[in-house]
Amino acid sequence: MTPGFPMPYAVEIGEGFVNRRRFEELVEEAIASLPEELFGFVDNVVFLVEDWPDFETLDAMGIEEQDGLLGLYQGHPLSERSTELTGTLPDRVVLYQRPIERHSRAEGVPVVEVIRDTLLHEVGHHFGLSEAELHRLEGEDEEP
């Protein structure tokens, strides 16, 4: 366990922390709640849950705080795909449980709402939207 971070399997749901099994259930519920007109176009993507982003990923993205990344899209956006990509591994959307829980607690919103917002953001990358475009669509004036 990383020093200075919460216990890995806190169960205080009201406080924004849940065990892994329950968190994965919330992810499944959030995926199922996405509009079919959007999710129907998601192609060749696997959704994963990890506790924390690794330090190499954070460094590559210029993020200093380990809880500064809620999710990550890794792959080839639909807007950039070609027949040359046939047979490649699926794209990945990784949701980082502990940062999502911390964000939920800090903002006073349900964990499932943060999960859903993070999923929508990462699926936006799958469709080829940039960070700036996503922040505009999310109603934010500038990137965090």
Image: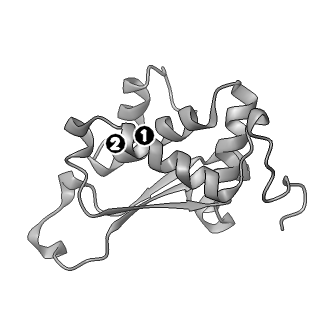
| Residue designated by label 2 | 124
Identify which amino acid the numbered label 2 is placed on: Gly
Towards the viewer: 126 or 13:
13
Q: Quick check: 46 left or right of 117?
A: left
Residue at 79 percent across and 48 percent down: it is 11
Residue at 59 percent across and 63 percent down: it is 57
Dot 2: few (<14), some (14–19), or many (≥20) neighbours within 10 Å?
many
Q: Are marks 1 and 2 in contact (CB under 8 Å)?
A: yes
Residue at 48 percent across and 35 percent down: it is 117
Alpha carbon distance from label 1 to label 2: 5 Å
> In what quadrant of the picture does the N terminus appear?
bottom right
Q: SS for tag 2? A: helix
Towards the viewer: 108 or 92:
108
Residue 80's image quarter? bottom left
Towards the viewer: 100 or 135:
100
Expressed as whole percent of the image width and height from the top left, the position of residue 71 reads 53, 50
Expressed as whole percent of the image width and height from the top left, the position of residue 121 reads 42, 40
Q: SS for tag 1? A: helix
Identify which amino acid the numbered label 1 is placed on: His
Dot 1: few (<14), some (14–19), or many (≥20) neighbours within 10 Å?
many
Q: Quick check: 120 left or right of 10?
A: left
Residue 131's image quarter? top left
What number is the disc on residue 121? Answer: 1
**Residue 96 visible:** no
Residue 49's image quarter? bottom right
**Residue 74 visible:** yes
79 up-or-down from 33: above or below: below
Q: How is the image coloured?
A: one colour
Residue at 81 percent across and 51 percent down: it is 10
Expressed as whole percent of the image width and height from the top left, the position of residue 84 reads 13, 75
> In what quadrant of the picture does the C terminus appear?
top right
